[in-house]
Amino acid sequence: MSTKSRKSTKRNYEVNTKGRVVGIDPGKTGGLVLLEDDEWVDYLDMPMVQMGNITAPFVDGLAVRRWIIERAPDEIVIEAVASRPGQGVATTFRFGASYGSVVGVALSTQYPVTLVPPAVWKRRSGLLGTSKDAARLLALKLFPRAASALKRKKDIGRADAGLLARFGR
C-alpha cells in the first residue's frame, strides 16, 4: 500500500475545473449532480441505508462511491456544512456522521475534492440571504434539461448539488 500523500482539497475555493464536475449536498435530503460543460447530465438523491435496529438511516457510502466512480468526474465539490444553532445533539451528531461519510467516500475515489462553505457558493450564486426555494428556481433557470428533476419544492437537495457543481466550473 502506498503511503504517498496527495493534495485532496483546495482551501482558496477557486475551482477552475473544465469538463465533468460532481456537486454534492451531503445532507440526508441532499444529493449528487453531475454537470458536463455546464449541462445537467445526471443526479442521485442521497442514498440512505438502515443499519440494524438503529432508527435513523446512514448515508450509503458504497452507493455514493459507485455513482461517482461510474461518472469519472474531473472534480468533486462538496458543501462544507456545519451544525446550526438550535439543532439538538443527536441531530447534529447524525448530520456530522453523514457529512463525514460523504467526504471520506469522495476522497476514497481519488478524484480532486473541494470543500466549499455554504456562504461562499451561495454568495457567488447570488443566493445569500434568500429562501431555500430560490436555489431551486435558479437551478431551473440554469439547467432547463433538469426541469423534471427539480419540479418539486422538496428537490432543493438536487438543486443545491447542481449549483455546487456549477461553482466548480
Image: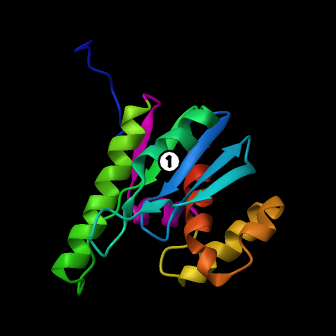
Residue kind at label 1, given as amino acid type: Ala
For this orientation, the residue located farthest to the left is 89
Q: In which image quadrant can residue 95 be found?
A: bottom left
Taking the image as drawn, is residue 35 in sight? yes
Q: Quadrant of the C terminus?
A: top right
Residue 154 position (above or below residue 113): below
- Residue occupying image coordinates x 39% and y 58%: 59
Q: In which image quadrant can residue 93 be found?
A: bottom left
- Residue occupying image coordinates x 59% and y 50%: 165
Give the residue number, with chain letter if any, for mark 1: 63
Residue range of the region highlighted in magenta in the rendering: 110-125
For this orientation, the residue located farthest to the right is 145
Q: Position of residue 47 (x, y in %)?
A: 50, 59
Q: Quadrant of the N terminus?
A: top left
Query: Front-most of 9 and 3?
Result: 3
Q: Residues within 10 Å of mark 1 (few under 14, many from 20)?
A: some
Taking the image as drawn, is residue 13 in sight? no
Query: Front-most of 70 and 151?
Result: 70
- Residue occupying image coordinates x 61% and y 56%: 44
**Lateral position of residue 126 relative to residue 89, left or right:** right
Q: Position of residue 76 (x, y in %)?
A: 50, 41
Q: In which image quadrant can residue 161 be found?
A: bottom right
Q: Position of residue 140 (x, y in %)?
A: 75, 69
Q: Position of residue 37 (x, y in %)?
A: 74, 40
**Lateral position of residue 109 relative to residue 104, left or right:** right
For this orientation, the residue located farthest to the front is 52
